[in-house]
Image (cartoon, grey):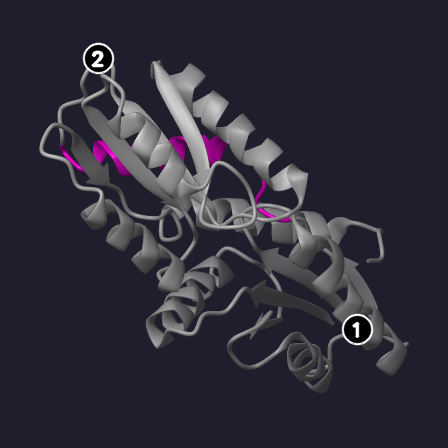
Amino acid sequence: MQAVLYVAHGSRLKAGVAEAIEFIEKVKFNVDAPIQEICFLELAEPGISEGISKCVERGASHIAIIPILLLTAVHAKKDIPEKIEVGKQIYPHVRFTYGTTIGVHPKIIESLYDRIIEKKTALDADAVVLLVGRGSSDPLVKQDLTRIGNLLKKNYSFQQVEVSFLYGASPHVDEALNLLLNSAKKQIFVIPYLLFSGLLKNGVEKKIKRLSDPNHSIILCDSIGDHPNIQEVIAERVKEAIETERVG
């Protein structure tokens, strides 16, 4: 019997965990699988091992494990696969396949533009967009977010789209914001490249308030997690993982 195990990151904030669960529950409506369970990588329960056990207890013979992560870094490359390997040893009769992260996808670019437009603020000709990612020591994260920023710039004719990070990669969001505030650009749209509410998004809000400048308009947009496009991309990733023969 087919099972899908969604692996969200987790958060210290109950609101962030609740938001992740609500998001995945919406995804489930677009997925044709008799068993669908939710677990967390860290900071919340149930963990991945417990999620695998729940799927097996419900009769799973094939578990497609789906990382609910925007970009591919250590969590997707190492942490989740290690848990899958443990599961394979405990349940040798179960087939495991491992999906991919959301990654670079055309629907993501559309979502980012929607986040800007929904602020109902007239766009200056030289408006700047600053994407703020979680960050990682993995260079692929910066590479992919830069690709996303370049696509947003190209597809919607922005003069400037910059990327920054909260930790683990440069430029840091403080550095990027300070550079923009010292430039001639007056309108800055800041998009937290995060799926759900949490301490990291709160941190972005605090930084913007601290760096507020009467000569510039800093517009904080919503993170992208509850955009319908994101749900559609996850459903695509589920379909790919169910149909693949790759054992992860």
Label 2: which secondary element? loop
Under mark 2, the amino acid is Ala
Q: Residue at x 48, y 58 (%)?
A: 27
Magenta stretch in the rendered image: 101-120
Residue 40: give x, y in percent of width and height. 56, 72
User: In this figure, which residue is indicated by the disc labeled 2?
Assistant: 125
* Residue 58, position as x, y percentages in the image: 67, 83
Residue 245 lies in magenta, yes or no? Answer: no
| Gap between marks 1 and 2 measured at Cα | 55 Å
Q: Is residue 103 magenta?
A: yes
Q: Residue furthest left?
A: 214
127 on left or right of 154: left
How would you classify the magenta stretch by its main secondary structure? helix
Please give left or right for residue 59 compared with residue 189 in the image.
right
Point out the image quarter for the N terminus. bottom right
Question: Residue 104: which quarter of the image?
Answer: top right
Q: Residue at x 21, y 49 (%)?
A: 210
Question: In x, y percent, where is residue 175?
Answer: 39, 37
How crowded pointer 2 is (Cα within 10 Å; few <14, some 14-19, many 20+) is rated as few
Residue 62 as seen in the image, left or right of residue 112: right
Local secondary structure at mark 1: loop
Q: In this rendering, would 31 be left or right of 129? A: right
Q: Can you see residue 104?
A: no
Mark 1 vs mark 2, foreground winner is 2
Q: Which mark is residue 61?
A: 1
Disc 1 residue type (three-letter): Ser
Asked if one can make out residue 122 in the rendered structure from this viewpoint, the answer is yes
Find residue 160 and report its horizontal and vertical position in percent. 36, 18
Q: Which mark is residue 199?
A: none
Furthest residue toward bottom = 57
Task: Identify which residue, 70 or 145, lies in the foreground.
Answer: 145
